[in-house]
Amino acid sequence: MKTIPIDKLVDVIILYCNSNGLTITPLKLQKILYYIQAWHIARFEKHTLFDELPEAWVNGPVYRSVYNTFSEKFYRNTPLKINVQGDVPEELETQMNELDLDQLQTEHINTTIKFYSPQSEGNLVLKTHADAPWNIARDGLDAFERSSNEISIDSMFDYYNPLLA
């Protein structure tokens, strides 16, 4: 099972939202990345799509490298855009092809982005807060206590895999 750089997937998510008239903020991006990774782990027997694991922050799962990339936009929650020369849908297709994934992984990414990207960031935060993996990683912490605890592969697999049936 192939893994990809997280920054390449970030570009795909932003381009998808840009090409479909959907707002994508740093917070919403984090939640979509989380669900892509969590469902990938569940569907493909604990294989990660990218190497980084999310941390259990107050507002839900966060990938530190992605936070660092967009930190100046994170707290102002500025919508993200990728400027392309030419057609955005064509650039999205090019970016997806460059990932060089098999058909199942490509379908997984597309399906997950299509399902979660129309949802509000607030709704996605609430969903991640309702799911066991985030709660397990934050066990013993106060509601607004900072944390860099990682959400484990096992907790994501154990929670999401049975939901596939």
Image (cartoon, rainbow, N blue to C red):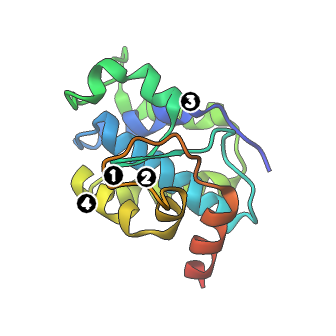
Instruction: Give the percent coordinates (x, y) of residue 65.
Output: 53, 27
In the foreground, 75 or 45: 75
Give the alpha-carbon distance from disc 1 to disc 2, as whole Å. Answer: 5 Å
Residue behind mark 4: 123
Chain-order first, disc 1 or disc 4: 1
Is the C-beta separation of discs 1 and 2 under 8 Å?
yes
> How far is disc 3 from disc 4 in space, using C-alphas?
25 Å
Of the numbered discs 3 and 2, the one sitting upstream in the chain is 3
Give the x, y percent position of residue 119: 26, 57
Instruction: Point out residue 127 in the picture as x, y percentages from the top left corner.
Output: 35, 65
* Residue receiving disc 1: 117
Which residue is disc 2 drawn over?
A: 113
Front position among marks 2 and 4 = 4
Front label number (3 vs 4): 4
| SS under mark 2 | helix
Q: Residue at x 61, y 36 (%)?
A: 97
Name the amino acid, label 2.
Answer: Ile
What's the mark number on residue 137? none
- Residue behind mark 3: 8
Q: Amino acid at mark 3?
A: Lys
Q: Earlier in the sequence, mark 3 or mark 4?
A: 3
Q: Residues within 10 Å of mark 4 (few under 14, many from 20)?
A: few
